[in-house]
Amino acid sequence: LAQGNLSQVQGPPRRCAYGQPGRAPLNPARSKPLPEMAEVPPAKRARTGGSVAADEKAALVARLLAAKDASGKTFDEIAKALGLTNAYTANLFFNQAQLKPDRVDMLKAAVPGISCEDLAAMQRAPMRSFDPAILQEPAVYRTYEAITHYGEAIKALINEQCGDGIMSAIDIFMDVGTTTGTHGEKRVVITMNGKFLPHTQQVAADNTAPAPRS
């Protein structure tokens, strides 16, 4: 069909139950069926001890990743469409970040296979967690190893440059990219741009809710 005739086949844009407009995939017949709970790998189902909530989260993640695969887009491409960092965008698909209302239509346009129900679930505050077994995955373990190996040096440099405090893991921009080394090899670049949070001196007079004394 010519591009101009697509509207005759698709019909008007579909609206999600929560009121956000969304358009169905151009060819739903080609979309892979989204996984049910029984199809979710046991390792994902055990994220927080095999609870019902953990099973639901694992099933949601499986459906979101299946919709991403069906879209044919990379996390970088989806991130560009959303105007977000690629790490935050990937975390949305792992239900480790909250989808804000101003990005719902953008995500639906970029990944049309995501259902209205799952878009609504992505807008709720997620239960952020991780499976300890993820540290057995080499890509994750080596990143963890780099942070711990350089931990004391990182702390010393933060203290020298910013003072006594920490880097926020909440007010942070995380971006993953690549560069080319001097010998032509591909190299991984991970940027963590976190707000500095100083440790506060606990002045008793400033404590608006002191603990009761018996």
Image (tube, helix red, strand yellow):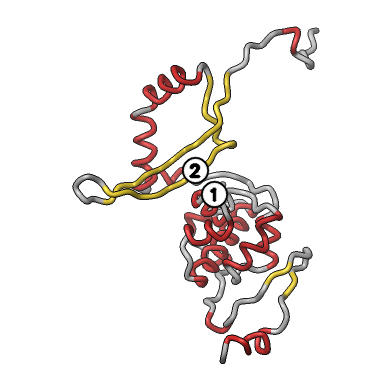
Frontmost residue, 54 versus 192? 192
**Residue at x-position 57% and y-position 67%:** 111
Give the mark nearest the N terminus, 2 or 1.
1
The residue tagged with tag 1: helix, strand or loop?
helix
Specify the quadrant that holds the C terminus: top right
**Residue 193 picture location, percent across and down:** 50, 36
Above or below residue 75? Residue 201 is above
What's the residue type where badge 1 is placed? Tyr
Specify the quadrant that holds the N terminus: bottom right
**Residue 187 picture location, percent across and down:** 30, 47
Frontmost residue, 132 versus 101? 101
**Residue at x-position 37% and y-position 40%:** 143
**Residue 87 picture location, percent across and down:** 50, 49
What numbered label is drawn on residue 140? none
Frontmost residue, 106 versus 87? 106
Residue, disc 1 = 88
**Residue 40 picture location, percent across and down:** 52, 63
Residue, disc 2 = 174
Horizontally, is 26 left or right of 183 in the view?
Answer: right
The residue carrying pointer 2 sits among few (fewer than 14), some (14 to 19) or many (20 or more) residues within 10 Å by Cα, namely some
Frontmost residue, 52 versus 89? 89
What's the residue type where badge 2 is placed? Met
Q: CA distance from mark 2 to mark 1?
A: 7 Å
The residue carrying pointer 1 sits among few (fewer than 14), some (14 to 19) or many (20 or more) residues within 10 Å by Cα, namely many
**Residue at x-position 70% and y-position 65%:** 117
**Residue at x-position 58% and y-position 86%:** 3
**Residue sitting at the far bottom:** 1
Above or below residue 163? Residue 116 is below
Above or below residue 22? Residue 156 is above
Look at the numbered discs 2 and 1 and tell me whether their residues touch, using CB distance below 8 Å. Answer: yes
**Residue sitting at the far front:** 4
The residue tagged with tag 2: helix, strand or loop?
strand
